[in-house]
Amino acid sequence: MLHAAGHPWSVTFSFGLWGAKLATLIGVNVSSWDYWQLSYPAVALENSLLADPTTVSNLGIILGALIASALSGNFSNQIKIDKKLFFAAMIGGFFMGYGARLAFGCNIGALFSGIASGSIHGWVWFLFAFIGSYFGVKCRKFFY
Amino acid sequence: MIAIKKIETPIVLFGVTFAILFSYITYSTIGLRHFLVFAIGIGLGFSLYKAAFGFTGGWRNFIEKRDSSALRAQFLMLALAAIVFSFVIGSKSFIYDGTILGAIAPVSLSVVIGSFIFGLAMQLGGGCGSGTLFTAGSGNTKMVITLFFFIIGSLAGTYHFAFWSSLPSLGAISLLDNYTLIETLTFQLGLISILYLFVFILDKKKNKITDYNNIFRFTSSNLLQGPWPLFFGFCAFGAV
């Protein structure tokens, strides 16, 4: 991955990019936002989605998991979602996305790749995400 | 031994066809590099699913039950990656003309707040970045919802980016740029070992573990259909 992409594995950058592409489609002028004027995001927004390494690796992960799960016969065999689970997924998903942008990545882009690259922000990320998780576990009883 | 279920052939065929089609499109419109990244992604998705490798559940097991097995697998994986990365970063890529960059970002208040929010939210959403991707891919409807809102949240995060990046920051601190390779590795591996021992001792105190190598063990002899040990999961991480 390092050799092919030229940077360590990351995941969440593409989520913002997909959101930005969607927003552009419905007429929002995302490219005027500060973040999308930074050199790397600006180029990514301009280019085809397929030119973004994170997008292609993410699609690969989704497909790989789909094949693996169908091979094990588990694809269609999933839990039903009720209203509470839906809210948990909604709140959890939204704030993971928001948090990841502030923190320059997720467990992969910041913790794993950051620490492995010798960047101190990876360690800081680990510490505070772990503390956050401690409170998150306590909050789970309201939803699960 | 875990019972083996029937293969869902149509879904497998759909996945494989789509993968081939997408490989072709990526290769012909963008190039070899992106095709390779896509192929590695497939391997990762496959292995992550098989090993059920996730940060979220692993951390929760430790927080709730002091079960340190997933955390220990993660520390081993980090140690391995830290060693490999130290040698590869800054060198030329084999595949294209360019230098391999590290994931270096500023140490700032926004990282502190953002990672705290992320850590809390991942316990509610039920998966981290990669965890959400592979569980959504494996057919888990709840995680598809999580993924959808993950995308919306990411966009919202970019909207407020200017504000958050104006918060106090120490700037980016790269160990490799400031210290020698030996010093960096000593610090990194030392810290990882201390944390490994720390969670192991807490686990042992509470749960009296006798099976030290559970993270390496297969519970099923069927490689294609049965679950893989956690060890395999972190080898997959090591590959990236």
Image (cartoon, rainbow, N blue to C red):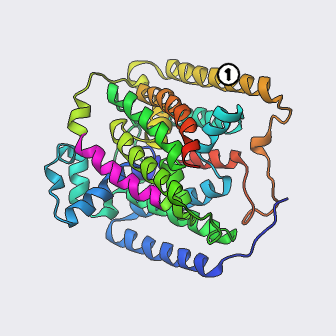
Name the kind of residue labelled 1 in the image.
Phe
User: Is residue A67 on the magenta stretch?
Assistant: no
Q: Nearer the viewer, residue B69 or B46?
A: B69
Mark count: 1
Q: Nearer the viewer, residue B79 or B217?
A: B217
User: Is residue B147 on the magenta stretch?
Assistant: yes
Locate residue B139, reporting x and y percent.
56, 66
Locate residue A66, reporting x and y percent.
57, 67
Query: What residue is shown at x 46% (from left), y 53% (from top)?
Result: A87
Q: Quadrant of residue B80?
A: top right
Residue corresponding to mark 1:
B198
Query: What residue is shown at x 48% (from left), y 37% (from top)?
Result: B119
How crowded pointer 1 is (Cα within 10 Å; few <14, some 14-19, many 20+) is rated as: few
Which chain does the residue under circle 1 lie in?
Answer: B
Judge from the rendering whether residue A63 lies leftward or rightward of residue B90; answer left or right.
right
Q: Is residue B221 above or below residue A5?
A: below
Q: Nearer the viewer, residue B105 or B7?
A: B7
Q: Quadrant of residue B77?
A: top right
Judge from the rendering whether residue A138 lies leftward or rightward of residue A104; answer left or right.
right
Locate residue B214, reporting x and y percent.
79, 41
Tell me the magenta residue range: B145-160
Residue furthest bottom as drawn = B10
**Secondary structure of the residue carrying numbered label 1:** helix
Judge from the rendering whether residue A59 lies leftward or rightward of residue B58; answer left or right.
left
